[in-house]
Image: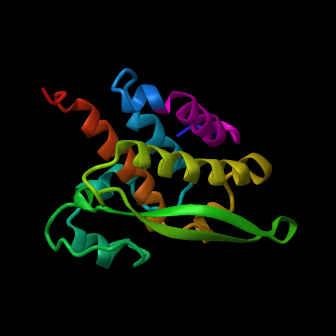
């Protein structure tokens, strides 16, 4: 893969923010491929992020999870997880390559699927990651960002895109 521009994550977050109404209104399709390419460029996961969404939850728990997501679906695919591990803050000492992300759990199915909430979770996480990438590039993510946070962003994107493909209720 070509080297990703340091501003690509922030630009994607800004685009999501500007288009959230159109995405939720099903007027603009969400490009999961572009989001997954950003996530793969972080080099947190050994395989492309999309492969984890089809993996059984029990296999992901054993072979890649940071053990933060609520994975209780056994053989059900990761794509069916309702929990999201949202990146909500980053701090640290950049010259010493010491950073710390903070996270919180979000359930986008609390009262039925909430596409706007899923889009906002993805957008906010990308804003936080984009702030670091814009200043320091992509080098710190592999050692400091939790795999479940990366999978959560991809999960939000896939769930939202799948929801967009559903027929409008009559």
In this rendering, the answer to whether 44 lies above or below 25 is below
Residue drawn where x is 41% and y is 30% of the image: 23
Can residue 40 be seen?
A: no
Res 53 quadrant in image:
bottom left
| Label total for image | 0
Residue drawn where x is 19% and y is 32% of the image: 166
In this picture the colour scheme is rainbow
Q: Residue furthest right?
A: 95
- Residues in magenta? 5-20
Position of the C terminus by quadrant: top left
Q: What main secondary structure does the magenta stretch of the protein show? A: helix
Q: Position of residue 88 (x, y in %)?
A: 60, 62
Give the camera-side residue of 125 and 116. Answer: 116
Give the camera-side residue of 2 and 20. Answer: 20
**Relative horizontal placement of residue 73, taking residue 142 as reference (left or right):** left
Res 6 quadrant in image:
top right
Res 2 quadrant in image:
top right
Q: Position of residue 73 (x, y in %)?
A: 18, 71
**Relative horizontal placement of residue 146, taking residue 63 as reference (left or right):** right
Q: Position of residue 94 (x, y in %)?
A: 82, 65
**Relative horizontal placement of residue 125, taking residue 7 as reference (left or right):** left
Q: Position of residue 49 (x, y in %)?
A: 39, 53
Give the camera-side residue of 62 and 114. Answer: 114
Residue drawn where x is 87% and y is 66% of the image: 95
């Amino acid at each position: 893969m070509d080297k990703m521009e340091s501003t690509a994550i922030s630009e994607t977050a800004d685009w999501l923010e500007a288009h959230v109404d159109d995405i939720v209104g099903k007027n603009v399709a969400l490009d999961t491929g572009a989001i997954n390419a950003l996530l793969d460029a972080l080099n947190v996961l050994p395989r492309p992020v999309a492969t984890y969404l089809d993996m059984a939850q029990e296999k992901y728990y054993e072979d890649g999870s940071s053990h933060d997501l609520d994975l209780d679906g056994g053989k059900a695919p990761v794509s069916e997880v309702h929990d999201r591990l949202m990146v909500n803050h980053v701090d640290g000492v950049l010259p010493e390559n010491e950073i710390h992300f903070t996270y919180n759990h979000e359930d986008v199915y609390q009262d039925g699927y909430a596409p706007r909430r899923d889009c906002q979770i993805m957008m906010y996480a990308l804003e936080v990651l984009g702030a670091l990438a814009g200043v320091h590039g992509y080098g710190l993510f592999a050692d400091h960002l939790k795999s479940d946070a990366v999978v959560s962003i991809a999960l939000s994107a896939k769930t939202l895109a799948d929801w967009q493909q559903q027929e409008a209720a009559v």
